[in-house]
Image (spheres, helix red, strand yellow):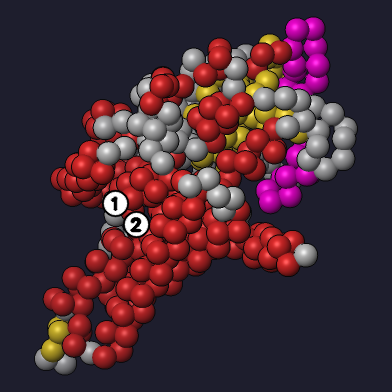
Amino acid sequence: MDQAILDEFLGTIDRLVRDHLVPAEDAVASADAIPDSLLVRLRDLGLFGLSIPEEYGGLGLSPTEEVEVLFRLCFASVAFRNMIGTNNGVGSGAIVEAGTEAQRALLPDIAAGRVITAFAVTEPECGSDVASLRTRAKPTEGGWIISGVKRFITNAPSAHLFTILARTSDKPGTAGISAFLVPRDTPGVSIGQPEKKMGQHGSHVSDVLLDNVVVPADAMLGTEGAGLKLGMRLINRGRLNIAAVCVGVAERALHEALQYAMQRRQFGSRIAEFQLVQAMLADSRADIDAAKALVRETARRQTSGEDVSLQASCAKMFASEMVGRVADRAVQIFGGMGYMVGTTVERIYRDVRIFRLYEGTTQIQQLTIAKLMLRAAG
């Protein structure tokens, strides 16, 4: 995207956040739902198709451009980003990379937000250990029969289209796992009740139950047995995006803490004048700037075509840990008020805890980083 056009678009995102999303945060959290009027705004700005190529109706942003959008968008409640996240990630990326022409015909509706996608990997007995996946797809005449249970699937209650990972053979490990595109209205697909979560209210997760779901042969995405490999090829951008989200949320937490510190008075002075409060503000600023620089550099490398597996894991690990520290300091600066429900920093404190869990836990990132370092060292 031309820089002048990008700058104008980023300014539009800033205005959307300031004028519409931030004022709606409390109502979204209270109702645990995003109103249709705001979804229309997200659609009209093309936010459901940020990373989808222009030829399929998206904006076609590069990784360097997309992270700049996320820095700004996630100054508001992360629930808004979660609604568009899968459409811009594996929900569309897998189709762009491995889809047939018929499957790619779905992309314009995904880019426009008319079709909401969800990526279903996690199961009751399968989290980080994808090799233990139990959902099965058995061949039948002209297609497959899929049975299993998927757990904690983001956007499942509102999704129209699922990418389902299922085992299609008894090959060991992940070699027998394939990917399928399954519309929500396919007989045998049912959606569980939305889970009650610690945070990120307004963004929903639930189980997806697959009871002898019959899909045609052309529902398979890519080749048989390559489902997990397909997901892993897209995971670097997903981890980078989560890191950018963490930066945006941390910016908001620090903003709230700084504003409060400049207003709150104790012992006859603003608490911003207390050196230990200043230390927390300074540590948070340095943390955020370090994470932002790492995200930008990783995005630059990815845009140039480099393999950023190590850097994406570093960015996701550092940024998700960083935002937890910043949120904790913000609550500390607010004191007792920061512990009260309804305070922005209290909501943020709950919202950010999940970042250290999904898209690979901190511990999985540590193992990935070390493995890649050892491999590079020979």
Vertical comparison of 39 with 373: above or below:
above
Task: Identify the image quadrant of residue 262.
Answer: bottom left
Q: Crowdedness of circle 2 by 10 Å Cα count: few (<14), some, many (20+)?
A: many
Vertical comparison of 240 with 36: above or below:
below
What amino acid is labelled 1 in the image? Arg
Pick the quarter of the image with the C terminus.
bottom right
* Disc nearer the start of the sequence (1/2): 1
Q: Viewed as shown, does residue 177 lie left or right of 17? A: right
The label number, if any, that marks residue 88 in the structure image: none
Specify start and end residues of the magenta stretch as a single range.
Answer: 126-146
Secondary structure of residue under mark 1: helix
Which residue, given by chain and number where applicable, does mark 1 sit on?
Answer: 72
Task: Identify the image quadrant of residue 150.
Answer: top right
Going 80% across and 12% down the picture, which residue do you hit? Answer: 140
Whether residue 191 appears in this view of the structure is: no
Q: CB of mark 1 within 8 Å of CB of mark 2?
A: yes
Q: Crowdedness of circle 1 by 10 Å Cα count: few (<14), some, many (20+)?
A: many
Whether residue 245 appears in this view of the structure is: yes
Q: Position of residue 74 (x, y in %)?
A: 33, 51
Secondary structure of residue under mark 2: helix
Pick the quarter of the image with the N terminus.
top left
- Magenta-drawn stretch contains 131: yes
Judged from this view, the residue extending furthest toward the top is 141
